[in-house]
Every structure is written in structure tokens, then in C-alpha cells.
Image (cartoon, helix red, strand yellow):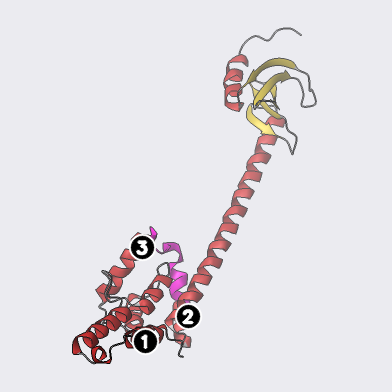
Amino acid sequence: MSEDPRLRTVYNLIRDYLAIPSPQYLREPEPILKLSHTILGALDGSAGPWRKWPPAREALIRSATDCWIPLEDFHEALNELPGPPLTASDVKARLLALWEEYCDRPDDSLKEGCEALYAEEKAAGTELAAITLIIRDWMGEECGRRYRVEQAEKDRLKAEAQQLAEETFLSGADCKWTQFGTAPALFCRVNGRMYRLDRVPDRMVEVQRVQSMEETAGRYIGRYKGRPDATKAIAYIAYQPEPRR
């Protein structure tokens, strides 16, 4: 049997109708008319509010909801599929409904690339259903490429910020908490004084006043719930007289 799903639908409906045991009933005009309406409804998708969208049209437009495809070309291609004639407004409204359903619209930043790829494939004679798949594949690759570029830029900026923080601390200038390499301890400098922060059990942190990064047993400052509390405490302590050691 043909791969056209509509043929299978018609075949099943007629088969079920012919299964009726009364030969006389099969020849009555009213049951035949009812069967005809059933077949048209199944082919045209008239069971819902979108009466012009049988399965083939619905599948095509859903496959292209996130693509940038010229509306006039889309309109023409959809009208070549089975179903009542569509106006340009029919197509635009269906797209609007689907965008609302998906809570998303095509990405504006991909529009130029989509249109260029569409024009190229159209000139080559590729049918619209195939073009939508090609465009969606390209969009996925492009989004992946952009993500990698953005991540690389974030990593670069993070590395630069880390280098600047380390250089600022080592220069003797005041700076925020800074980690060197993979060492667990953090260091900061406030009012020219150096402090070391270490994580301890129960998600707490301990702070010491140290004279160098190598010092691990400096003057104990306190234990705090987290870095923000430690920072607030040091902002006050750093400007108080230090006890003689």
C-alpha cells in the first residue's frame, strides 16, 4: 500500500463501513453521505478549530516554527499539500498560535543566516520540507558554535581577572579575597593587612591575620558562617589597633 498516510485513513474508514452486516444499509444515501463527511473530516483535520490544517500541513508548519522562512514561499508550499486553500493570514495566524504554544519565536540573531541558507537551497531546487530540516540542523550547529565562543570569552575574562587580582595582592595593595592556583586558602588585604581564610567543617570559615602567604598559624580572628560575614568583620577589624604579638 502507498506510504501516503491519507490512503491508510481512507482504507480503514471504508473497511469499517463495509463490515456492517446489512447490504441494504450500505446502499442507503444517508450512511454513504455520513461516511463521506467522516473521510473529509479525517483528511482535512476539521475536528478542531484549525480546520484548514490536515496532518501533512500541520507537520510541515510545526517543523518550521523556529526557522526564518519567507511567508509567501511557505504559503505556496502549504497550499500544495492536501486541504482547503490557505490565505497568507491563515499561515501567519497559525504560526502566531504555535509561537504562543511553544512560548518562543525564531531567534532574530539567526535570521540572516537562515535566509541565506534558504535562498541557497531554494535555488538548488530543494523542497521546503527538506529545507526546514537543513535550516534547523544549521541553527543547532550555529547555537553550539556561539555557546563555545561565549564560553571561551568568559574563560578569557575570568583568567584576566584572576591574574589582575593576584598581581594586585602581591603588589601589597588592598584587594578582595583571592585564590592562588588550586590552593584551598583565600587571601585578602585590607588597610595594608593580610588575612587568610580557610574552610572548616559545618560550612564555616575561619580567618587569621597573617604576615605572609606561607604562614598557616597566624593570629586567630574568628569563625564565620561564610565569606560575606568574614568580609564584614574584617572591614571593621582591619582599622582597629592590632595587639602586640
Q: Hey, what amino acid is under mark 3?
A: Trp
**Disc 3, SS:** helix
Is 229 inside the magenta-drawn segment? no
For residue 182, side relative to residue 12 (left or right): right
| Residue drawn at 51 percent across, 76 percent down | 134
* Image vertical order of residue 86 relative to residue 185, above or below: below
Measure the C-alpha gap from mark 1 to mark 2. Answer: 34 Å
Q: Which residue is mark 3?
A: 99
* Image vertical order of residue 108 relative to residue 237, above or below: below
Q: Which residues are magenta?
A: 102-117
* Image vertical order of residue 141 relative to residue 159, above or below: below
Q: Which residue is mark 1?
A: 15
Of residues 35 and 102, which is closer to you in this image?
35
**Disc 2, SS:** helix
Mark linked to residue 130: 2
Q: Is residue 171 visible?
A: no
Furthest-right residue in this view: 214
Q: Hey, what amino acid is under mark 1?
A: Arg
Sequence-wise first label, 1 or 2: 1
Measure the C-alpha gap from mark 3 to mark 1. Answer: 39 Å
Residue 242's quadrant in the figure? top right
